[in-house]
Amino acid sequence: MSKKLLVLTLTAALIAAFSMAPVPAPAAEPIKLTYSCFFPPTHVQSKLADAWCKEVEKRTKGKVKVEYYPGQTLTKAKQVYDGTVQGMSDIGFCLFGYNRGRFPLMEVVDLPLGYPNGKVATQVANAVYKKFNPKELDDVQVMYLHAHGPGLLHTKDKAVKKMEDLKGLKIRSHGTTAKVVEALGGTPVAMPMPELYQALQRGVVDGGMYPLETNKGWRMAEVVKYCTENYANAYTTTFYVVMNKGKWNSLPKDAQEAIIQINEEWIPKHGAAWDESDKVGREFMLKKGRKFIKLSPEESARWKKATDPVLDAYAKETSAKGVPAKEAVEFTKKKLSELSK
């Protein structure tokens, strides 16, 4: 065989070999999810949500990527839940209180039961959900719940030292807290948190019910002067992180397992963050020269007695809807007492 023929034969053989070699399959495209959160990107709770997104990508080895949209950029606060159900976002983070009546059983957590801190409130919220598995959340896949520290009264110009001082004051509230304000003699004004700063500036409202963290997280200490420390009947607000059910069911089993594990880890992170930010909020108020008003034991007892009927009204009204409200109230009070110790 001539040298030229040998080269041609070897070349043909190599071409045939390469043509028969298996072609590597293209890398699978990552599953992309969208996440809508009403908190501004600078808020510690928003930062935790963003960290959750990054952790999902890390634990699923890039199989699932989450695009994070804070500050109501994808859906407005009151639309977050329905937006998740309808697929406007795949994941939503907001609070039940913005859709009053929609989540009758979970409203039990927001009653004025005297919550001591965010850690306990967060544990109570998740315990209630796991105990009752309410049908009102059947249209989503619940990731996890969390709740802020004691919700207290803040006022712009008038120091509230006793219940009578609340008369005639318009107080921003939402959900169950509106009934708390009313029971104490104030005038409740329904309003989502993102609107409160300007409402206080313009005199639309005279104050608001919210946890101490809000004074820094939402800069409210710039527009309020007083905080009344009404701990005996302090409420909390339950926040949810939920996923579109169809999208959840479409995820591979290993991705679901990774996310479930992350969710369990993120529950105490949120509780701890609420407590730490309450400290920061208090310090920010003091730095601004704002005043804290401590109620006397007698006045605290008056406030608690005035708002106890809110619990009874909740149990009666919600039981009429076929919800085990009385059992839920007793369970929540018992769990709160156990965890507070």
Image: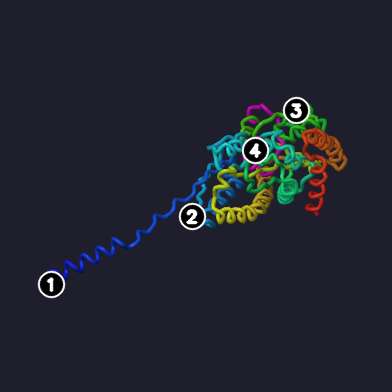
Which is more foreground, mark 3 or mark 1? 1
Which is more foreground, mark 2 or mark 3? 2
Mark 4 — residue?
220
Mark 2 — residue?
62
Mark 3 — residue?
187
To which quarter of the image does residue 75 belong? top right
Question: For the residue marked with disc 1, what is the amino acid?
Answer: Lys
The N terminus appears in which quarter of the rendering?
Answer: bottom left
Residue at disc 1, secondary structure: helix
State which tag comes first along the sequence, 2 or 1: 1
To which quarter of the image does residue 184 belong? top right
State which tag comes first along the sequence, 3 or 1: 1
130 is within the stretch colored magenta: no
Gap in Å between the C-alphas at discs 3 and 1? 102 Å
Q: Is residue 159 above or below residue 328?
A: above
Gap in Å between the C-alphas at discs 2 and 3? 51 Å
Which residue is the extreme one toward the front?
1
In-front residue for pair 219/25: 25
Which residue is the extreme one toward the bottom?
1
Which label is found at residue 3?
1
Measuring 60% from the left and 47% from the top, which residue is drawn there? 44
Residue 157 vs residue 327: left or right? left
Gap in Å between the C-alphas at discs 4 and 2? 39 Å
Q: Position of residue 328 (x, y in %)?
A: 79, 43
Q: Is residue 292 above or below residue 56?
A: above
Question: For the residue marked with disc 2, what is the amino acid?
Answer: Gly
Gap in Å between the C-alphas at discs 2 and 1? 52 Å
Q: Are marks 4 and 1 in contact (CB under 8 Å)?
A: no
